[in-house]
């Protein structure tokens, strides 16, 4: 009986998560003429603009620079998309949280799933660019889903914490936007870490997002196996942050309901 009840609840939660994700996805593109096509066009347009700006600076030192740039861009965008949208998940669904009883964790998770779907559409744009610049497919590309899985876990852990903080402090939204800008410049999205001083290389190398970006690039562009250290960091950051974020979220639930 207990197993049947747990199975029933699990199915209910999956259904709710699917419905919430679908609702948020439709809302996002409701007033857009091109709709989901923007998920493909946006990274292409961004890559074009950034490549025009930085190609003359970095093209000589970075092979297939537009592909290098786009790999970094869509990986970073997955993190920023998940964390930014998860932040307001509880506040935006205040009425539903009060009226309906089911795990509150579902709300940030549904936002994270939307960002993940957008990332997969962005991969279409990346494949187009890779074909244009004649990047050959390799076995190492099969390792990319592992990198994205741990990046997703890392991002959701941060997103859970931000969603709690935003309930109590509205200013978190503005502070976090500044932090994201700093993080982007510290993630080697459009430059090579080799151009930095040894001290700055150490600083950037300790950035978890840089680690995920590097593994993604190595597998997609350079057909090289990530090192053991990179794999360890990828898993440790992903699992560690997800556990911390989930713990903070669950411990704060009562305070969240009182505040809302």
Image: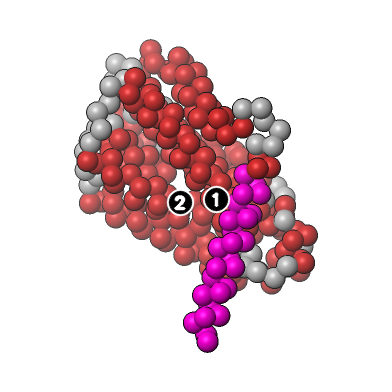
Question: Which quadrant of the rendered structure holds the C terminus?
Answer: bottom right
Q: Quadrant of residue 217?
A: top left
Q: Which of the marked residues, 2 or 1, is nearer the chain's N terminus?
A: 1
Magenta residues: mostly which secondary structure?
helix
- Nearer to me, 57 or 50: 50
Classify mark 1: helix, strand or loop.
Answer: helix
Note whether 205 is above or below 63 in the view shown.
below
- Residues at circles 2 and 1 in contact by the CB criterion of under 8 Å: yes
Looking at the picture, how far across and down is residue 25, in whole percent?
Answer: 62, 44
**Residue 100 against residue 53 in the figure, above or below:** below
Q: Give the x, y percent position of residue 170.
A: 72, 50
* Residue 161 visible somewhere in the drawing: no
- Give how far across and how far down residue 139 sits, in percent: 22, 41
Depth order, front residue of 242/143: 143
Residue matched to label 1: 112
Along the horizontal axis of the image, is 243 left or right of 164? left
Specify start and end residues of the magenta stretch as a single range: 1-25
Question: Foreground: 25 or 140?
Answer: 25
Q: Which residue sits at x=42%, y=49%?
A: 151
Q: Are there few (<14), some (14-19), or many (20+) residues within 10 Å of tag 1?
A: many
| Cα gap from disc 2 to disc 1, whole angstroms | 8 Å
Question: Which numbered disc covers residue 163?
Answer: none
Mark 2 residue element: helix
Residue 12 forms part of the magenta stretch: yes
Q: Residue at image x 65%, y 47%? A: 24
Tell me if residue 234 is in the magenta stretch: no
Residue 52 position by quadrant: top left
Residue 121 shown left or right of residue 251 in the figure: left
Q: Residue furthest bottom?
A: 1
How has the structure been colored for display?
secondary structure
Q: Which label sits on residue 152?
A: 2
Q: Is residue 139 visible?
A: yes
């Amino acid at each position: 009986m207990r197993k049947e009840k747990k199975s029933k609840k699990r199915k209910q939660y999956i259904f709710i998560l699917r419905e919430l994700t679908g609702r948020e996805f439709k809302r996002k593109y409701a007033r857009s003429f091109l709709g989901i096509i923007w998920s493909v066009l946006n990274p292409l347009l961004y890559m074009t603009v950034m490549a025009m700006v930085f190609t003359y600076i970095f093209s000589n030192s970075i092979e297939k620079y537009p592909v290098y740039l786009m790999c970094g861009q869509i990986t970073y965008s997955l993190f920023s998309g998940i964390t930014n949208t998860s932040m307001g998940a509880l506040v935006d669904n205040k009425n539903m949280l009060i009226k309906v009883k089911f795990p509150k964790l579902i709300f940030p998770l549904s936002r994270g799933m939307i960002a993940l779907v957008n990332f997969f559409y962005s991969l279409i744009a990346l494949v187009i660019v890779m074909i244009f610049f004649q990047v050959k497919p390799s076995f190492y590309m099969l390792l990319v889903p592992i990198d994205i899985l741990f990046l997703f876990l890392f991002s959701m852990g941060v997103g859970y914490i931000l969603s709690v903080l935003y309930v109590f402090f509205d200013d978190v939204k503005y502070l976090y936007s500044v932090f994201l800008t700093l993080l982007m410049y510290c993630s080697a999205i459009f430059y090579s870490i080799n151009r930095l001083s040894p001290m700055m290389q150490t600083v950037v190398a300790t950035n978890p997002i840089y680690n995920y970006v590097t593994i993604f690039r190595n597998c997609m562009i350079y057909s090289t196996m990530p090192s053991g250290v990179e794999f360890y960091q990828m898993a440790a950051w992903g699992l560690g942050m997800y556990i911390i974020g989930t713990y903070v979220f669950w411990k704060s639930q009562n305070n969240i309901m009182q505040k809302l």
